[in-house]
Structure formats: structure tokens, C-alpha cells
Amino acid sequence: MNGNLQVGNLFGIPFYVNVSWFLVLALVTWNYGSGLANSFAGLTGVTPWVLGLLTALLLFASVLAHELGHSFVALRQGINVNSITLFLFGGLAALEKESDTPRGAFGVAIAGPAVSLALFATLFTIGTVFSLSGPVGAIVSVLAYVNLALGVFNLLPGLPLDGGNVVKSIVWKLTGNPYKGLAFASRAGQVIGWLGVGLGAASILGLTTFGNVWTLLVGWFLLQNANRSAQTAEVQSRLEGLTAADAIAPNSPIVAADLSLREFADRAVLSVDHPWSRYLVVDADDRLVGTLSVECLRTIPRDRWAETSVGAVMSTQESPTPVDSNRPLLDVVRLLEEKQLSVLAVIRDNGALMGLLEKTRIIRLIQQSQGRNPAPYASLIL
């Protein structure tokens, strides 16, 4: 899973850590362990390093709690959470789909920062009320302020941060269009990303004392993800207004059930330069009743082709998932992604088969609308 290792399940959600997480774990352990050793003379031997490791694990537990906040709100909306992953720059809750309403999207987005800020308030209160001091007080203080930073940083109003998703939901609510929200929040994320890269680079060159190499790396990470979100928004804008009917493959592979195999071979296979490998079979009312593979011709003697109908040898177990011809193409794209499908059968209002829809056809529509190679966008819908 792209360098991710599954370490268990949390509330039924697969939990992964990226290999980069171990590097950060070691660095944080060393940083806080050495800090505790220098601050408290009574800590000797392996004790500061054990406490450093404990602090590092608790910090990552805070990130995990942040992602669980998103996950629990999504689950309450009936949205499955495919996984939670910890990696170099934090964590990610991979949701099955987006919320259906701007209010739902706002709730999912704000839940993570809300958990982080609640942890800050709780830890800060504990440290203050009990007047914690020494190593325990230091650890509680670090955890409190890291959660504060985590909550505030994620509220920055640009994708891929939670604040960007908050902005997206607000623009969605105001305009009634989720894709305009995505485009606006993506542009804001690009600005924040470039700002981080600029400040980080300036600090490395000694032009400013604000920022460091981590500022540059985080800015670059945000910029790359914001660019990807912007590409997604562009794809969505180009597909807006189109329906499943607009993406039907020309000369879709459709054959009548009452056709003989001889006629099928002559009309559908031998008369075209590049025949389809599988055909959709329809009845007298043009309703989808099954599929027929060209390979079946090899299993039936030629002298029986004229007397054997397509319907007699078709398969009724492998028909593609049907979709209404008037369904928005953006909904179709989400369906293809969620169900991991490559083709769909497009059906008219009366149930008659209209044609076959393929993923590659959607990419061609994008290419036609922008007049250039759509390769950068292909991975967004495949």
C-alpha cells in the first residue's frame, strides 16, 4: 500500500503507518529525550530516552485522535472510512466518499481541529490545576501546545488542510456548487503552500529568521496537494453539465438476443477492424439481458452457428452495472471510483439500453474540452 504498513484496526477502521513515520518517530524521540536530559539533571541512563519515546508516541496519538474526529463524524453520516494512515507530515483519514451536503462536509472538516483544540484545553487545564512540574509537567505542556498548533495550523483556509475543506463547504453552501468550493479552496492552498516554500527558502538563505527547512518541506507538501486539488476542480468544471449519455462509446457493442451466431459473427465481428471482446445483449424491447464474449465462438462448431442464437449462449452473470442516461457525469465518475468499475451500461428512462460507458471515454471528453493532452488528469478519474 505505497509504503504503508498495517498495524491494526481502530473501531473497525484499518490503521496504517507509513515508513516515513519511523524516521519522524526516531527524530522526535531524540529531540525530546535530549531536551529532557538537558533540562532535568536527575534523569540519567535510558530514562530520558524512554520518556522521549513516550512523548513521541503520545504526540502521534494526538494526530490519530485528530483523524478519528474526522472519521467518527463521517461514520455518523453513513460514510465509510477506508483507512487512517500516519505519515511524515501528519495523518490522513481516507473516506469512502465526500459528504452529500455542505453542512455535512463542514462537520467532517471541523471535527479534527475541534478534537485537537479540545485536547489542548484539557491538557492545559490539567497542567494548571495540578501545578504539574518536572518531566511530567514538561511532557503535558508539550502535548498541550502541540495539539494547539495542530488545531490552529489545520484551520488555515486552504486545501489540503481542514480549514480548506471548511472554506470549500462554505463556498458550496453560498453558491450551491461543490466544485466552485473546491476550486476556491485549492487556490487558497496554493497561496499558503507558496508562502511556506518562500519563507523556508528565505530562512535557509539567511534572509529571515522566521521559518526553517521544515517550513519549506511542509509548504512544498501543501503546494503539491493543493495543485492536485486544483486539477480535480478543473476536471469537475469541464464535466459539469454533462450526463452519462454524453460519454457513451461510439458504436457501442450491442447485439440482439434473437440474432444467430452466424449473423453475430458477420455483422459484429468480421465486418469491423477492431471488434469488441464482449458485447451487451438486449431483448426485443432493447433491455439488457446479458453479455456475450467473442471467445464463445471458439467453443461452438461453425456448422451450428446459424441455428444457435446469441441468447442461447449469452452469460447473465457478468452484465455491467446499469446507470441512468440522465445521471450527471460527475456522479458517474464517483460511482466508477467507489465501485472500482471500468464500464457501465447506460439505460434510458424506459429501461432500454442506450450504450456502453468506459472510463477512457470520459478522459477523451476532457481532452476535447481543453484541446490538449489530458494525461495529468487521467489519474484523477481512473
Image (cartoon, helix red, strand yellow):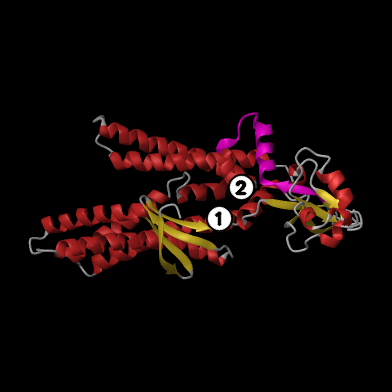
Q: Secondary structure at mark 1?
A: helix
Which residue is identified by label 1? 105
Region rendered in magenta: 354-376
Q: Residue at x 44, y 39 (%)?
A: 223
Q: Is residue 8 magenta?
A: no
- Residue farthest toward the left in the current orientation of the protein: 41
Residue 274: which quarter of the image?
top right
Q: Is residue 360 magenta?
A: yes
Q: Which mark is residue 178?
A: 2
Residue contact at pointers 1 and 2, CB within 8 angstroms: yes
Crowding at label 2, few (<14), some or many (≥20) Cα neighbours within 10 Å?
A: many
Foreground: 55 or 311? Answer: 311
Measuring from the top left, give residue 329's x and y in whole percent: 70, 46
The amino acid beneath tag 1 is Ala
Measuring from the top left, give residue 2's x and y in whole percent: 44, 52
Foreground: 29 or 105? Answer: 29
Measuring from the top left, give residue 361's x and y in whole percent: 69, 41
Q: Is the residue 94 above or below the residue 380 in the image?
A: below
Residue 235: which quarter of the image?
top right
Query: Is residue 90 shown left or right of residue 57?
Result: right
Q: Which mark is residue 213?
A: none
